[in-house]
Image: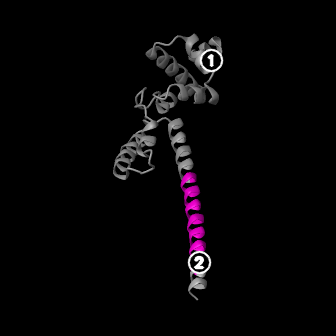
Amino acid sequence: MEDQRVVQEGLRLKQFRKHKGISQKELASVLKCSQPNLSKIESCELGISSSLRELLFREYPDLNPSWLFTGTGEMLTEVYDQSYISELIRDDQTFEYQEANEYFSRFEILIKEGKVPNSVIVSIFSDMRNLIKLQQDTLGELKKSQEDLRKSIETNAKLIDKLLG
């Protein structure tokens, strides 16, 4: 079964390369492997290593992993524009909730249909972790400012009491 998968992946990689109009030499350069090794992969003598897969999906985000691995779905997927989330958070840090909600609903459908490369999903989660960290830092700063303000009010109230007292 594993040998059959290797054969099919190699053949599908070759099909993808030809569809893109890329020579073996060009693809080998992108994947940082030798042209003879790429030839062996496409002729089903070698399997596609995880490091080659990672480079392949990073360089060609429109390549559908499900299609490459199993032959299911379309060869190419819609390419997700990662900058769109950044645009939802404006320079003034206001979040356009309705627009974001609609976008994430559409994006959820694409994920369920297998049209979003794993590398994009990983990148989104990384961006979300960074945003959560930023929110936590900002909240911490606000709490500190609130405490400083409370102390300042108490100090000023004591000074006023002394002056009036």
Identify which residue, 31 or 6, lies in the foreground: 31
Taking 70 as reference, is 48 left or right?
right
Residue 161, x across and y down, in percent: 58, 84
The residue under the point 56% across, 44% down is 126
Tell me the quarter of the image containing the N terminus: top right
Q: Is residue 139 above or below residue 13?
A: below
Identify which residue, 14 or 142, lies in the foreground: 142
The residue under the point 59% across, 30% down is 54
Q: Quadrant of residue 108?
A: top left
Residue 66, x across and y down, in percent: 48, 33
**Of helix, strand and loop, which one carries label 1?**
loop
Instruction: State the scheme by which the image is colored.
Output: one colour
The residue under the point 38% across, 48% down is 100
Residue 103 appears in the rendering = yes
Is residue 58 in the magenta section?
no
Q: CA distance from mark 1 to mark 2?
A: 78 Å
Identify which residue, 106 or 68, lies in the foreground: 106
- The residue labelled by disc 2 is 154
Question: In this picture, which residue range is highlighted in magenta?
Answer: 133-157
Tell me the quarter of the image containing the C terminus: bottom right
Is residue 142 in the magenta section?
yes
The number of callouts visible is 2
Q: Are marks 1 and 2 in contact (CB under 8 Å)?
A: no
Residue 49 appears in the rendering = no
Q: Residues within 10 Å of mark 2 (few under 14, many from 20)?
A: few
